Image (cartoon, rainbow, N blue to C red):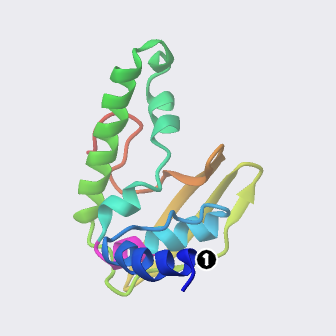
C-alpha cells in the first residue's frame, strides 16, 4: 500500500472521531441560515453564535472601538459571542428547526424570515470579507458587549 493511501486509512478515521468540524458555508445568506438552523436543531448554540459578525456589531455599538487596544477589542467581542451563545441556548428554538423564506438581498445586506412550530424569526445578514454573517435579529442580541 502506498504511503499516501496508508495515511488516508489511518489518519482520516481519527479526524472524523475527534469531532473536527467543517467550516460553515457562508457563501450566501441562505447557506448561512442553513448552518444556523442546523446548529440550533443540534443543540449547538456556540456553533450558531459563531455565525454572527461580532467585529462589525462591536464597531456599530462603539464608534471608538478602533482606538482601543486589540486585547480590549477581543474582550468585547468574546463577551458578545458568549452572551449570544447563552441567549441562543435559552431562546426555545424549535426542535424541528425553521423553514426559511426567500432572502431579500440589497447589495451587501440581506434579510431572511423563517418560521417553525408557531415561531417566527427575522435575521439580518451582512456580506463582509469572510462571507455572509448574521448582524441582527437574534432575540436579545445587542451591538454592545451584552445580551438583554
Q: Nearer the viewer, residue 134 or 129?
A: 129
Compared with 26, 62 (above or below) is above
Residue 81: image x %, image y %? 34, 46
Residue 11: image x %, image y %? 41, 74
Horizontal side, residue 37 vs residue 133: left or right: left
Q: Nearer the viewer, residue 134 or 2?
A: 2
**Please, what secondary structure does the residue beneath circle 1 have?**
loop
Q: Quadrant of the N terminus?
A: bottom right
State the residue at coordinates (42%, 67%): 21
Compared with 148, 104 (above or below) is below
Give the residue number, with chain letter if any, for mark 1.
101
Magenta-highlighted residues: 38-43
Compared with 49, 19 (above or below) is below
Q: Residue furthest top?
A: 67
Q: Residue furthest right?
A: 107
Compared with 13, 72 (above or below) is above
Horizontal side, residue 21 vs residue 128: left or right: left
Residue 76: image x %, image y %? 33, 30
Report which quarter residue 98 is drawn in.
Answer: bottom left
Residue 29: image x %, image y %? 63, 63
Number of numbered markers: 1
Principal SS element in the magenta part? helix
Magenta segment includes 26: no
State the residue at coordinates (44%, 29%): 61
Q: Nearer the viewer, residue 41 or 8?
A: 8
Report which quarter residue 2 is drawn in.
Answer: bottom right
State the residue at coordinates (49%, 70%): 35
Q: Quadrant of the C terminus?
A: top left
Amino acid at each position: 500500500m502506498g504511503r499516501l493511501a496508508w495515511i488516508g486509512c489511518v489518519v482520516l478515521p481519527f479526524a472524523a472521531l475527534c469531532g473536527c468540524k467543517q467550516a460553515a458555508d457562508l457563501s450566501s445568506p441562505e447557506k448561512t441560515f442553513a448552518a444556523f438552523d442546523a446548529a440550533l436543531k443540534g443543540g449547538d448554540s456556540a456553533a450558531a453564535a459563531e455565525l454572527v459578525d461580532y467585529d462589525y456589531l462591536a464597531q456599530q455599538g462603539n464608534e471608538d472601538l478602533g482606538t482601543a487596544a486589540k486585547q480590549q477589542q477581543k474582550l468585547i467581542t468574546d463577551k458578545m459571542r458568549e452572551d449570544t451563545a447563552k441567549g441562543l441556548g435559552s431562546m426555545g428554538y424549535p426542535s424541528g428547526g425553521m423553514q426559511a423564506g426567500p432572502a431579500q438581498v440589497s447589495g451587501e445586506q440581506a434579510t431572511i424570515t423563517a418560521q417553525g412550530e408557531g415561531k417566527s424569526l427575522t435575521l439580518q445578514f451582512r456580506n463582509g470579507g469572510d462571507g455572509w454573517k448574521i448582524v441582527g435579529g437574534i432575540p436579545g442580541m445587542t451591538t454592545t458587549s451584552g445580551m438583554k
